Image (cartoon, rainbow, N blue to C red):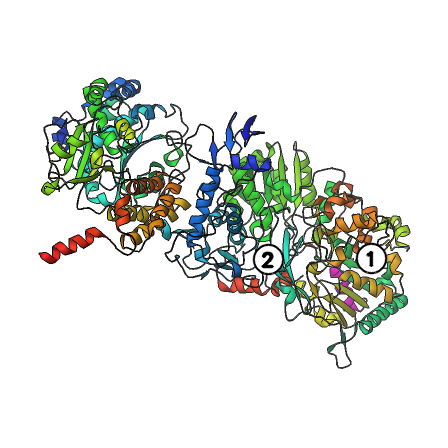
Amino acid sequence: MPSLVSHPDEVKIISHRFGQGAAEIDRYIELDGYKATRAAVEKGPEWIINEMKASGLRGRGGAGFPTGLKWSFVPKQSDRPKYVLVNGDESEPGTCKDHVIFLHDPHAVIEGTIIAGLAIGSKMGFIYLRGEYRYLLKIMEKAVADAYAKGFLGKNIFGSGIDFDVITQTGAGAYEVGEESALMESLEGKRGVPRIKPPFPAVVGLYGGPTVINNAETIASVPHILLMGGEAYAKVGSERNGGTRLFGISGHVERPGVYELPMGYSLRKAIYEVGGGIRGGKKLKAVVPGGSSTPVLTADEIDVGLDFDQMGKAGTMLGSGGIVVLDESVCMVEFALRTIQFYQHESCGWCIPCREGTDWLKKSIGRLHAGGAVDKDIDNIRYLAENMLGRTFCPLGDAAAMPTIGFVKKFRKEFEDHLNGRGCPYKHAREREEALV
Amino acid sequence: MADVTFTVDGKKLTAPAGTLLIDACKAAGIEIPAFCYYPGLSLQAACRMCLVRLEKVPKLQTACTTPVAEGMAVSTETDEIKQARKSMVELLLGNHPLDCPVCDKGGECELQDMTYKYGAGESKYVEIKQHREEQQWSPVVYFDRPRCILCYRCVRVCGEGMDVWALGVENRAVGSVIAPNGGDHLNCEECGMCIDICPVGALTSGTYRYKTRPWEMNHVATICTHCGDGCKTTLGVRIVTDGSEIIRGNNRDKSGINGDFLCIKGRYAFDFTTHAERITKPLMRQADGKLAPVSWEQALDFAGRRLKEVRDSRGGKAIGVIGSNRTTNEESYLLQKFARGVLGTNNIDHHRTADYAAFAAALKGHAGREASLRDFASAPAILLIGNDPTEQHPALAWQVRTNVRLNRSRLYVANHADIKLRRQAKAAVTVPQTGYAAFVQYLSGREGSFDGNDATAGFCDAIRNESSLLIVFGSELRGRDIQSLVQFGLSLPDTKFACLGDYSNSRGAADMGLLPDLLPGYVPVSAAAQFNEEYCASLPTQPGLDLVEMFDAAGRGDLAALYVVGSNPVARYGIDPSSLRNTFLIAQDMFLTETAALADVVFPAANLYEKAGTVTNTYGDLQLVKKAADKAGVRTDFELIVRLADKMGANPKTLVPFGKGVRADFGQTRGAQSGEADRHAVWLAANHLEPKLSPFDPFAIFDEIQRLVSAYNVPRLNLLTGNDEHIKSELVQIEPGSARRDLVFPSNDDLYTSGTLGKYSAKLRETVESGTTVMKPAESETAAD
């Protein structure tokens, strides 16, 4: 279990129970647990949705869609059952925020699920964890069982006359089922490929019923927002980006870890102060700011606030909050290769551009890294990625194409250094170093 | 839905709201390319070929998933879109083996077409292509895996279309591959729809693969000779040393009553035509008691002379004639004309597989009440009584499934067995195997022996409340039961009917009067005088012997001669061969069947794929068959009947009244290709030429049929251009309610048997023996007709 980290700049809202044994239900209750749910039961759906809208909370999965708005799309009347679905299929490389929530504060997820259910009039929630989080499933399952034992779940919760059930489930290890409709397919026991949209899940979702599907961090933020009030939460963050968010800072920094920072916090400070700067006093080369699918920033481009809008203006994305810091020893071609290997492996194979495109990108970049490419191959790589972008069935193709275009655009020189049989200069340097040792 | 107006490439278009953009464009003549989109199957949006630009939408959108909306503005062929499509083709070609020069699909491949259109001829990749070994999934389905472009059409047509669900996708990412759910083999109905629907050469046919190229064949659209559905199948024909040979059957232009569908028999079971045991020389019984080849003149002389002798000495009553369920209407008609007019007998019958006469009687005077096969694709409600269409009428089963799936048609099933179509049924009742008649009484609200309960009562109530209903019944119902059912149906607001019989022209055989008591058009023989003038003969007016009575008479020594055309009653009815020892037997067949083996003279006959004419399917849809194959040595039944009559001294010009009525040798006898008939007629007219007429031209007889059988007097041009025309069954002349002997003996052929033809189809047998089929145990092994 990774040890928790801390920094004075943090604003601990979601993470304020981390490390305090809140996975145990009695301890959780001591720490104001289930108060928000009680309030939600008393004050009703309209109040919940208004608070959520006021909070400015935007989806923490990466797309940044306003949560309150999403909930309000669910039709009030429905012939089919409505569902709340918690997307804990946290698979984006560089991202590890939901992990700490499930580990330290599982009841916040349950609470958020119940509240979302109350808001849309659903009687059942599903908490879906990625396949690799089987060990966290035990924690979640215990938390759910404890909540049932206390009467917080099941029939007539909090004496409200409302029934609400929660079911936990894990995936089988496919990145693609992090996409909301693919997750529903997976949960229904089918092959994990995305669905055609529209209809959107809020209208036709799980088992054909209206479904609210939210990222685990989004859901875990809900009880905190109701406790502190939507407006107060909004004030913590930047304009149109309410609250805080968990950032996973990894890579070549002195103090990697998951930190809760207010939205809009400076990326430079996140790296140099919160993360403790570049490890071993080396120079910063690049930052992948929001999980591996977001376009790379160079060392000169890090004076930007960490929120959805500012990052968008900087030509990249806030994404899932996984900040990957790369120092000067990194070969950007190798990094591009490693990134595309991931997406090539995780493409579900449904549509042509993603299935074929990721594979040819992997082959071409691999050959280039090994020195087997000529100048026009760099253009071909970019051509390939640009022809995938925006044309795939789901965003996975974009997730593969966007960073690739970024690497070629911003580090073309490094690609050129590999050409005509030369191979990777960094590899040669490392080999020389090792030989000296 | 209300119409909306939108703009495509600057053109203003109108279509009902909710129409998919790709369909709306197609209807307006704007083609948007797609691999994965297939009308009627679920949407995939996987191939990304149909990307178009919608005004004010940031990304390109798939036309196959975009419903048209008011004011929508669409561009379909800008440089940006062309580039997007080019890059898709480029990506597909990256791993696609460029073996077009040897690929079955070369020349009719959608990927080839797209490559020509959008151009991606040069590869940007140097890495080797992904290769996978080819697989054989069944005797008729091969899968060349690297050629597959993963459009999922096969998966969907198998699952959604056929309700078989034999195919799925294995692995993920670039390793994704279509695979049978049965592991390494199919577990299915072997319909071959997956091959038909494959846009590339990934799925190929076991009967056709690597045999030829598409452009080296003649493509003849004709009607399948197997079951009673009458599907259009396009036969690919190639010249061989002893004629021309069929090497492919498929549903090329999808213009037939079967829509997209073709089953295993229509697709693969043409191979009986080249079976080694086919007879190609006339045979005569010799002094040693064995059959030996003789010349045509010898055989015809002998047979004609003997028939004449019998007629002149013992009268027509001593001669019997048995016709076929698989000859054309013209041949069946000619056969009864020959029997009645030349042989002077009403002893004529055929193997009856449904009681069409009772059905005709019940519908007399009720115009437009007989359903076409096409009607099943759109009927809001269908009641199926008896039969198992999945096995016996696969095209009907397809239409019903499609209708339920796409239009939410309500299907009601009453059957003694757990038939597959129950899966699509809104409600079903189980009827005792012998209790169909009682069920009809119960349905009609009459007291009877049917043991009803709440469920069956609800079932019947639901049917009675249908405002528009299609009732289809199998051979379980006969005679008065059909009369009762039709009466019940006519009491509902809007009901159509269909009667299911077995073979490609069983209906035609009955309609054309291959019956001892009924003339063509169900005219009672007592009223035969109305035919005398046209036939230049005085027809017998007493009913003749039926099929069973003929063999009884033969056993008693009262039947001196028997002429059997395309039928095998000895095997079908279990006739004791010794009962025929005193009967002069002439058999006309493709094979030395149990019946032919007893004959004194055997004429080698052509089959339905080797002749022209018309056939009527069990629903009364009249269609044209065209000559596809040719086999040296055999002759059509039509020609053989005329030659035999000639040898008996009859006037062929009377028998085949060429020169009367509409005059044209529409080219059909020469194996005309689609369209040639019209061109030929137009050319003749333009040049003021008299058409060349021949006594072997079936269209001369078709003229007469249209003159004498008013139900068949349908507009002809539509028929000649390869479409179906529904006959007007209300115009029959039979009186309802007359008691007739029930001689209906269904074949119960399943998907893999087809009487004698099935027995001689190597592919059908091989497929059954391979064990890849989902089939019920065959009820009848000796099916023969």
Which segment is the magenta one?
Answer: B544-558
Mark 2 lies on a secondary structure that is helix
Q: Is residue B227 above or below residue B601?
A: above
Task: Between label 2 and label 1, give the one nearer the viewer.
Answer: 2
Mark 1 lies on a secondary structure that is loop
Instruction: Inspect the image, locate mark 2, and give the three-letter code of the amino acid beneath it.
Output: Pro
Q: Which residue is located at x 62 percent, y 66 percent?
A: B760
Q: Looking at the image, which is closer to me, B9 or B550?
A: B9
Q: Looking at the image, which is closer to me, B340 or A254?
A: A254
Instruction: Inspect the image, locate mark 1, and give the three-letter code of the amino acid beneath it.
Output: Asn
Q: Which residue is located at x 65 percent, y 49 percent?
A: B500
Number of numbered discs overlaid on the protein picture: 2
* Chain letter of the residue beneath label 2 in the structure image: B
Q: Which residue is mark 2?
A: B214
Q: Quadrant of residue A58?
A: top left
Q: Position of residue A369 (x, y in %)?
A: 27, 52
Report the quarter where the N terminus of chain A lies: top left
| Left or right, A136 with reference to B8 | left
The answer to whether residue B228 is magenta is: no
Q: Which residue is mark 1?
A: B346
Q: Is residue A163 above or below residue B83?
A: above
Report the quarter where the C terminus of chain A lies: bottom left
Most common secondary structure along the magenta stretch: helix
Tell me if I can see residue B448 in this picture: no
Q: Position of residue B386 (x, y in %)?
A: 59, 47
Which disc, if any, is residue A176?
Answer: none
**Disc 2: CA contacts within 10 A as few (<14), some (14-19) or many (>=20):** some
Tell me if I can see residue A295 in this picture: yes
Q: Quadrant of residue A42?
A: top left
* Chain letter of the residue beneath label 1 in the structure image: B
Measure the C-alpha gap from mark 2 to mark 1.
Answer: 49 Å
